Image (cartoon, rainbow, N blue to C red):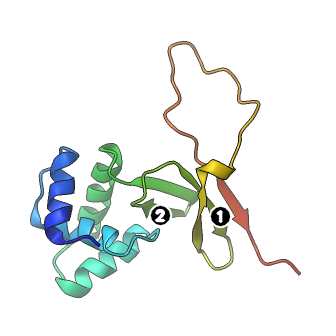
Amino acid sequence: MHTRESVTQMLRRHGINPTHQRIEIGFALFENPQHPSADEILALVNARHAEVSKATVYNTLKLFVENGMVRELIVDPNKVFYDPNISAHHHFYDVVSGELTDIPATGVHIDGLPPLPPGMITEGIDIIVRTRPGH
């Protein structure tokens, strides 16, 4: 379980200056590792302190993504979630409930990827399997 101190240390390890607001945003993200949206993180932080703006949350999450602290999951153009689990894994996305569930990477095999452009390396592969209840 994460504490504000462990979040502070994590921020420093990722080269991020641990300001009070960044610590609170990180704590909200890591204390209950799910796949929250920026608005959900904003609500969690402001339920405790009521001092963080929406712009601060979005800018901080962008900083966390750029520094490899969280993964950004774009499930459709209007829904972005943040995943504190940066290990290799994929996701099921229920398009009706909005629930994201992890899929272990060990069970997923990908064949037939095209060759990369010259000078490029693979940074990662994100698979989101969109599901809905059957009839």
The quarter of the picture where the N terminus appears is bottom left
Residue nearest the viewer, comparing 5 with 127: 5
Is residue 31 placed above or below 86 in the rendered structure? Answer: below
**Element carrying mark 2:** strand
| Residues at circles 2 and 1 in contact by the CB criterion of under 8 Å | no
Residue that sits furthest to the top in the current view: 118
The three-letter amino acid code for the residue at tag 2 is Phe
Which corner quadrant of the image does residue 18 belong to? bottom left
Q: Which mark is residue 92?
A: 1
The three-letter amino acid code for the residue at tag 1 is Phe
Left of 8 or right of it: where is 135? right
Give the number of callouts: 2
**Element carrying mark 1:** strand
State the image coordinates of residue 117 (x, y, percent, origin top left).
59, 18
Q: Residues within 10 Å of mark 1 (few under 14, many from 20)?
A: some
> Which of the two marks, 2 or 1, is nearer to us in this view?
1
Distance CA(mark 2)–CA(mark 1) = 13 Å
Residue that sits furthest to the bottom in the current view: 47
Q: Which mark is residue 41?
A: none
Which corner quadrant of the image does residue 135 belong to? bottom right
State the image coordinates of residue 84 (x, y, percent, origin top left).
39, 60
State the image coordinates of residue 9 (x, y, percent, origin top left).
15, 56
State the image coordinates of residue 99 (x, y, percent, origin top left).
59, 74
Left of 80 or right of it: where is 6? left
Residue 44 seen from this side: yes
Residue under circle 2?
Answer: 81
Residue that sits furthest to the front in the current view: 106
Residue at horizontal 65%, vertical 64%?
Answer: 92
Which corner quadrant of the image does residue 83 belong to? bottom left
